[in-house]
Amino acid sequence: MDATRNQTGCLKTTVIMVGSAIAFICVILLLADIKCAYDIENWWAPLYPNGETAHVEYDLFRARALGETYLYMTSTDDVETAKQFYRDTRLATLNAGKTRGLAWSESFVVPLEQAVAAAETNYDALLKELDEVTHEESRNELAVEISSAKDWLENLLRQLDQGARSLITISSACGT
């Protein structure tokens, strides 16, 4: 009878310790995610004020926080105006004495016509590659990639028709 009571106590202690460790790790991840999101949104990679989000890719819990994010925006502003916004933002961040911490980001601005041409080239290359692939599984994977490339091209063309002039790519990473 005594041995059973000790085994139950040991099991309870183990469950409490494992549960506490998991809770501690979750709290640390949550705090890191919140800190990353704050730093990226307010200091290192703010959204362009005259931009419209065209596409977002991220690998962890949410965009523009812990993990890697690729955000694509279009704007009716010219390329130099958008580039100047990000230069000014980076300079203000550095002048404020902000260090990188967990966050890192880069921004690239290109004329939308150049992005459309690149998207068309990529789409055409994928179509040619599909003609050469014989393995069914590879064809299916490539078909998904082609569909994504076509959607992206159509999105860019739609933005161009609506008067957008610039494509802004913001890549950010935090904690990686």
Image: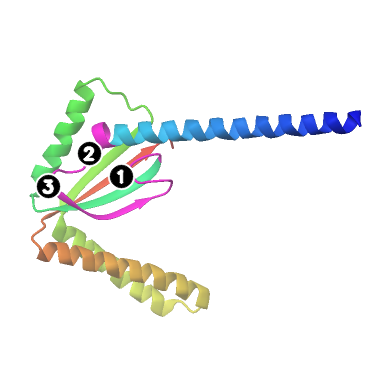
Question: Which residue is labeled 3 in the image?
Answer: 50
Question: Which residue is labeled 1 in the image?
Answer: 171
Q: Is residue 135 visible?
A: no
The kind of residue tagged 3 is: Asn
137 to the left or right of 8: left
From the top left corner, tell me how far across and down residue 164 is, in percent. Answer: 11, 57
Q: What distance separates the C-alpha of mark 3 from that of mark 1?
A: 18 Å
The kind of residue tagged 1 is: Ser
Q: Quadrant of residue 22?
A: top right
Report the number of numbered marks.
Answer: 3
**Label 1 crowding class (10 Å Cα cut-off): few <14, some 14-19, many 20+?**
many
With respect to residue 3, does 83 lie above or below? below
Question: Which residue is labeled 2 in the image?
Answer: 46
Name the residue at 56% across, 33% down: 23
Name the residue at 22% across, 64% down: 155
Give the structural element (helix, strand or loop) at label 3.
Answer: loop
Q: Nearer the viewer, mark 3 or mark 1?
A: 3
32 to the left or right of 15: left
Name the residue at 26% across, 34% down: 44
Name the residue at 26% across, 67% down: 121
